[in-house]
Amino acid sequence: MSARPHIVVLPGGGYGHLAQHEGEPVAEWLRSLGLDASVHAYPVKTRHPGPIDSVRMRVTELRASGVERVGILGFSAGGHLAGHAAALGLVDAAVLCYPVVSMLTPTHGGSRRELLGRWATPWARAATSVEKLVTPSMPPTFVWHTTEDNAVPLEHPYRLGEALARHGVPHALHVYPRGRHGLGMVTGIEGGEHAGIAANWTRDCAEWLRELGWVD
């Protein structure tokens, strides 16, 4: 069995520069902490349960290869998928970066339409809303967001934070005052110079992983 935890990285649902700066650079940072990491090309613009089935298969592969601890880190729509995987008990820790959380809100309807279609039933929307899936057995979860994110409003992380607290799930919730949606690692992209202390999310996350015992 592998003693080194492996973290699966899920970029945001957009193509191009989003997938690039939310993918391999993040995996490289995780490796610099002494972790194993890989970027998972889950199917975007694909209806449920395609994306979560894809993550389930990837996690199953890792565990079959001898990895004892599997974590997941996702951005935006990838953050929703990471949260869904965590709520289903597929992984042992989760990092959600400006995640889409709820399919019940009117905000960020684009993700809901991609995942569930235009005429999704209330039941289907609830069944894919991460805040409705939280149980006391959900693994430790780190969430970060920014006040200035106009694409995925703060309603999303706050709904999740409330659910995590209510169920006693160990978690950290960081809301930084500045920074647009899609910051990724923050440095080296347009808008990063205006992110302020949101650039500290990697430091805060590393400290959280250290407290969990995942990094030295």
Image (cartoon, rainbow, N blue to C red):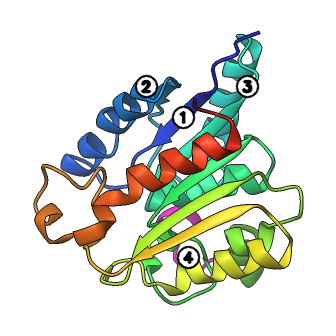
Closer to the eye: label 4 or 2: 2
Locate residue 147, reporting x and y percent. Answer: 36, 84
Q: Amino acid at mark 4?
A: Pro
Relative to 104, 63 lies left or right: right
Q: Residues within 10 Å of mark 2 (few under 14, many from 20)?
A: some
Left or right of 118: which side holds 181? left
The residue pinned by badge 2 equals 31
The residue beneath circle 3 is 60
Does 14 sit above or below residue 9?
A: below
Cα–Cα gap, marks 3 and 2: 21 Å
Disc number for residue 8 = 1
How many other residues sit within 10 Å of disc 1, few (<14), some (14-19) or many (≥20)?
A: many
Looking at this view, is 1 or 124 the one in front? 1
Q: CA distance from mark 4 to mark 1?
A: 21 Å
Task: Give the camera-side residue of 73 and 117.
Answer: 73
The amino acid on which the numbered mark 1 sits, given as a three-letter code, is: Val
For the N terminus, the quadrant is top right
Residue at horizontal 36 percent and vertical 34 percent from the top: 29
Q: Which residues are magenta?
A: 114-120
Q: Residue at x 34, y 58 (%)?
A: 200
> Is 33 drawn above or below residue 77 in the view shown?
above
Which circle, 1 or 2, is nearer the viewer?
2
Residue 119 is a magenta residue: yes
> Could you tell me the amino acid type at mark 3?
Thr
The spot of residue 18 in percent (x, y) is 26, 51
Rounded to the nearest whole Å, what is the CA distance between mark 4 and mark 2?
A: 27 Å
